[in-house]
Image (cartoon, helix red, strand yellow):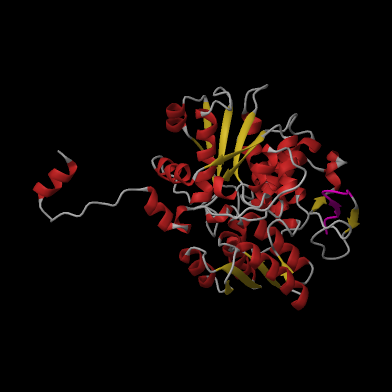
Amino acid sequence: MTEFIYECSSCKQTLPDDGVFYTCPTCDANLIVRLPFEKQPQLINQTELLNNPERSIWRYSPLLPVPDPGFVHTPLHKIGFTPIYRGNKLASQLGIKNLWLKDESPNPSGSFKDRSSAIVTARGIQTGMTTSITASTGNAGAAMACTAASTGTTAIILAPKSAPPAKIAQLQCYGARVILVDGSYDDAFELSKQASQTFGWYNRNTGYNPFTAEGKKTAAIEIWEQLLRHLPIGESLTIFVPVGDGNIISGIAKGFEDLLALGWIDTLPRLIGVQAKGSAAIANAFAQNADSITAVHAQTVADSISVNLPRDGMRALRSVQRANGCFITVSDDEILQAIATLGSIGIFAEPAAAAAYAGLKHAIQKQILDPAQNMLALITGSGLKDVHAAMRATQAAPIIEPTIQNLKEVMRV
């Protein structure tokens, strides 16, 4: 069993791995999982890791706090190692030097959230907890339902009734017990916490369970392996990440900080958090240089990053500050435009995923960043998650009588 300790992200209290912990028992702040290699980098052999034939997050098992639970011939072993594409066409349009897009839609349930659900599921199996619960607007729930189906465990999903129907259908197809809450994501989040305490279910909540960030950090390790280590000496990378509750960007930062501790990188890549203007609690705190996060009334087309009170907000804020980054807000119109733009190069993104590219475009247009920098946008989920938003991002197809003359007219040939 991999040894680790918990460390409070605020008061720095440490806790041994002798039970299930979610937040700090002293100050209730989020916990960080600390592994021995962070202080003893010689424990990890880079060559052995890179020569591992595994092509999933389990490739990085030596850097994870839980062992691979098996289930090799299931979707659990198809999570991660997603592609990075060159965005030459978009780079040319924006007038920037280099652009890459890391597309998370090939993951089994179609989103980035599969990474964290795999690690949480593995931890649940390790501790003998075979029923998990989470609050979700769709993606985290689908990811947990998928990994639960892969491993024969049980998933209970509390989703706000406003969640996109396609996402709810996906949850049910995986066999999860889905309960719609007449309230917000935040209401579902609080109910899930009460349920896990009442029934003894393992709580997978993003920004609450410390193992979620450990799954999300695997994307940072992939970015290092696939791209960062191949850049010319002296060149850096700026990464745009969509932000809702803050856990994705916290996890990405944790991955790069692990690589820094190992000595595999010399400096942290710059992290840019992108929030929808209608759900910008963390960006507001960053702009005000605040030491706490104030809740907002979230309203945005990007349901996956629509959060009133980000549960990992302070850690996200500190992570971006350590990475010499910033937060950017984008409008729903900018997000919808980004869906169509990404589609023009073959990437079908849901609104939250498209927000990363919308933020990158916004930063260039507002001259926030040097166009000579190397840039990457993290595209976190498939457009199939929210077809209604995709329909809003495009024009309706024309309807014609089936004659060549009508076809010529509509094609203006």
Depth check, front residue: 387 or 283:
283
Percent x, y of residue 74: 59, 64
Percent x, y of residue 136: 60, 63
Give the extent of the magenta segment.
1-12
For residue 46, side relative to residue 7 (left or right): left
Percent x, y of residue 253: 71, 42
Q: Main secondary structure of the magenta part?
A: loop
Rendered-image quadrant of the C terminus: top left
Q: For residue 65, which quarter of the picture?
A: bottom right
Q: Would you say residue 48 is visible in this rendering?
A: no
Residue 16 highlighted magenta (yes or no)? no
Residue drawn at point x = 75 percent, y = 52 percent:
64
Residue drawn at point x = 58 percent, y = 23 percent:
370
Q: Would you say residue 212 is visible in this rendering?
A: yes
Q: For residue 311, which quarter of the picture?
A: bottom right
Q: Identify whether 355 is placed above or below 366.
A: below
